[in-house]
């Protein structure tokens, strides 16, 4: 997992424009979402639309955002980073059967979907 791009926090005027636009976005349960960027329409899955909205929400709140790819199979360190815990704690979760693993030789690998499902079990702290 690497950070390829960092988007710095936007100024107050830009944040207000983003907030205004976000308030007009309706939450729907359609199979696709249309994203228009520089006049070009792109049909995207709802999960991608949700990610774009989350990115814009962070920027509107004055936060900077880091972007980068995430592999489908994660190392212990990568899983720990996503969960916000130590490598040791992730190993304990795996050993206790609370977080499924795949072994690659003697190395533990964690499916991204499993890590995200585990993370969703716990409410986010403010």
Image (cartoon, rainbow, N blue to C red):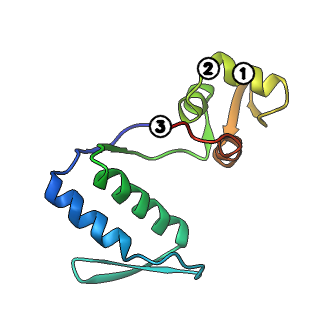
Q: Position of residue 16 (x, y in %)?
A: 22, 61
Check disc 1 and report its element: helix, strand or loop.
helix
Are there few (<14), some (14-19), or many (20+) residues within 10 Å of tag 2? Answer: some
In screen coordinates, is 74 left or right of 107? left
Check disc 3 and report its element: helix, strand or loop.
loop
In screen coordinates, is 70 left or right of 56? right
Front residue (pair 56, 111): 56
Residue at 41 percent across and 76 percent down: it is 25
In the rendered image, the residue lying farthest to the right is 97
Q: Nearer the viewer, mark 3 or mark 1?
A: 1
How far apart marks 2 and 1 lie (CA) works out to 6 Å
Residue carrying label 3: 1
Front residue (pair 22, 69): 22
Are there few (<14), some (14-19), or many (20+) residues within 10 Å of tag 3? Answer: some
Residue carrying label 1: 91
How far apart marks 3 and 2 lie (CA) works out to 15 Å
Q: Are marks 2 and 1 in contact (CB under 8 Å)?
A: yes
Q: Position of residue 63 (x, y in %)?
A: 30, 44
In screen coordinates, is 21 left or right of 52? left
Q: Position of residue 39 (x, y in %)?
A: 23, 83
Earlier along the polypeptide chain: callout 3 or callout 2? 3
Q: Are marks 3 and 2 in contact (CB under 8 Å)?
A: no
Check disc 2 and report its element: helix, strand or loop.
helix
In screen coordinates, is 57 left or right of 118? left
Earlier along the polypeptide chain: callout 3 or callout 1? 3
Residue at 28 percent across and 82 percent down: it is 40
Q: Position of residue 61 (x, y in %)?
A: 31, 50
Residue carrying label 2: 87
Q: Is residue 62 above or below residue 38?
A: above
Residue at 14 percent across and 59 percent down: it is 13
């Amino acid at each position: 997992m690497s950070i390829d791009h960092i988007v710095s926090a936007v100024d107050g005027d830009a944040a207000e424009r983003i907030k205004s636009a976000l308030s007009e976005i309706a939450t729907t349960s359609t199979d696709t979402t249309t994203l228009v960027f520089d006049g070009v329409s792109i049909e995207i899955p709802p999960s991608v639309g949700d990610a774009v909205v989350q990115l814009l929400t962070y920027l509107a709140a004055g936060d900077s955002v880091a972007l980068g790819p995430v592999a489908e199979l994660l190392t212990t360190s990568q899983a720990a980073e996503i969960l916000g815990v130590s490598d040791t704690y992730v190993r304990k979760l795996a050993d206790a059967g609370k977080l499924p693993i795949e072994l690659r030789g003697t190395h533990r690998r964690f499916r991204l979907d499993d890590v995200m499902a585990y993370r969703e079990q716990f409410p986010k702290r403010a």
